[in-house]
Image: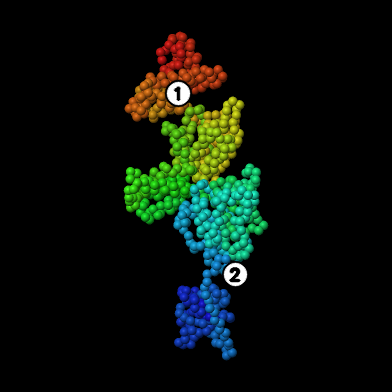
Amino acid sequence: MAGRFGFGASAAADSMTVVNTPSHDLALTNFAYCSPADLNKFAAPGSKHVLIFVGDSVVLTLRYPCFCPSNCVDRRHTRVSSGDQISVSRFVPPDNFKLALLTLELDFVKGKTNRTEQIINQREAASSKIFRHKEFNLQKLGIGGLSAEFTEIFRRAFASRVFPSHVVSKLGIKHVKGMLLYGPPGTGKTLMARQIGKLLNGREPKIVNGPEVLSKYVGETEKNVRDLFADAENDQRTQGDQSDLHVIIFDEIDAICKSRGSTRDGTGVHDSIVNQLLTKIDGVESLNNVLLIGMTNRKDLLDEALLRPGRLEVHVEINLPDENGRLQILQIHTSKMKENSFLAADVSLQELAARTKNYSGAELEGVVKSAVSFALNRQISMDDLTKPLDEESIKVTMDDFLHALHEIVPAFGASTDDLERCRHMHIHERAMLLVEQVKVSQGSPLVTCLLEGPSGSGKTAMAATIGIESDFPFVKIISAETMIGLSEGSKCAQIVKVFEDAYKSQLSIIILDDIERLLEYVAIGPRFSNLISQTLLVLLKRLPPKGKNMLVIGTTSEVGFLESLGICDAFSVTYHVPRLNREDAKKVLQGLSVFAEDDLDLAVEELNDISIKKLYMLVEMAAQGSDGKSAEAIRSGKEKIDLNHFYDILQDISADRLLSLKKGNGYGIEIVGTEKSYFDNVVNAPAAAENDGMCQCGPACACLDCKCGQ
């Protein structure tokens, strides 16, 4: 018998050390090897090989050169390892020694995947059975920005399947049978599931697209679910642990696996689907050769029993990509463009990745398509569509991408259109400190702020300014004007959806504009929506997920009403936003630059305790001029507002307000601020007017019988 390992020199003549060989070719021969000096100890002079007795059971042919190759089979027979000391002596066959010669012919064949023979303790190469390729690149598969998620999926769902079944049985564990990919639309859930199916070296994945499993016939829907597992059942029955892996992909699984009891269709078919699916995954005759991959945008709709360990136990959130992920996605979608020299040199993918906060993978693909459309459109002549096209001149430039960003707006981004509509540039707020707190906070991921004050004081404008200047990737306004005609339940669902979307962003701001309008508050009664009130209370106290920070800003003109409901206590800080005093009004008018320097102080004298909305309206009306033709000149700075005309407009507005105040005061309505000063001066000053024929109303007199000439 010959071996395929060798010996190094040892101090003792009959003891040698087992070492490894530097040559793989020597390991394929049926010899043991040593140095020439050691060979001379056993062989006759001039001989190049000799029979030796290794240990107490193996006879080998000893040869040189150099070190000896080691093989696991030979070491197993001789019961030695590399580095061990072993006794070696020359073997001399006795006279009655007999040797039987056995000739074997070996051939290599590729085993079939559905083979039935079992080899005990066979050591297979890692992933040789599970995956088709020894290695894979996610970007080559068209997957960008999801390396961390894919690593988690491999660890949870496939690591145990790489090892032979006897190793798994010794560990006493079971393979993961299902995973759930959830997250916002367009983030790559379906793409990842399909690519996982292509990577696996099993049967072709079965793809169920949402409600296509449903049938109009009684019992047919449940049969369709059972048919999905029929091949896996037959394979496991015949092949056992050696059966192939069967992958079943459920796209939009929330369409067929809603929480049992939540639907009111009367047939109970959705409940039956869930029950049938549960019995197949983890029933009495559960399968160990299936892997279910479910995908959904609404994890909250799924039945809880489906999500527990043993079923769809691996939950991976496919979230919006970060800046590095967006860069990978842009590189994937522009790779062919770059290879064929269609991408201009001025295109900076790093800059585009930084600009596209909260863009999903699908939206980034849309940006690339839109940019290409701009480049192609430059090569087309609308006057002559038959004109030959110059393919060499097609270049997608950075300007094309910037134009595309204006066309493709992220669904989970900031509502800049709504915010700009509410924004007033004069507001400079200390509330930006809240934004900085949210950015750096580690212990308080949720910060809530209530802006309360009289109507028209600029609360919504302040909140909108905070949202725009924060540069947060997610900013949304929840206002009653977007929910006109909706039921209470629909309003609650819409409010909850905005909060759920905000939880997907690392930094987010939600503005609850006019909370009393959201609550459908009516002073007579009073009446309000308790369902919406309870929804807001729950959401205002609910902490975002780990690693997510949120700022919630509420505005109200009825702080007393909110205090009675306990909503004010749900906000961590409350700021009072008063009307403008003379100093604030002067700053606003200086910023607008619509008055001459000499007239500015005189105009401000009559503007104490005025709302910002009323001030803007007053300026806009005065800017029209008496002839209505000077507005553009005043806006451009060529002309200034006439002070006398400004007084006339203020007098008209105040007179209208005075009539309403007189009527309102008869019902016991409290008059405060500017209206109170007008009311006191006009209504309670007849004695002063009779004494000297002059009233004390000032330049904006609204007395009907005044003799002051104002």
Q: Which amino acid does the dot numbered 1 rest on?
A: Asn
Within-10-Å neighbours for mark 2: few <14, some 14–19, many 20+: few
In percent of width and height, residue 516 lies at: 55, 31
Q: Nearer the viewer, residue 529 or 379?
A: 379
Q: Nearer the viewer, residue 653 or 615?
A: 653
In percent of width and height, residue 386 lies at: 34, 48
In percent of width and height, residue 681 lies at: 48, 16
Disc 2, SS: loop
Q: Residue at x 51, y 52 (%)?
A: 190
Q: Residue at x 65, y 54 (%)?
A: 279
Residue 100 falls in image quadrant: bottom right
Image mark for residue 94: none
Residue position marked by numbered label 1 in the rendering:
608
First in sequence: mark 2 vs mark 1: 2
Seen as rendered, the residue at the extreme top is 691
Residue position marked by numbered label 2 in the rendering:
117
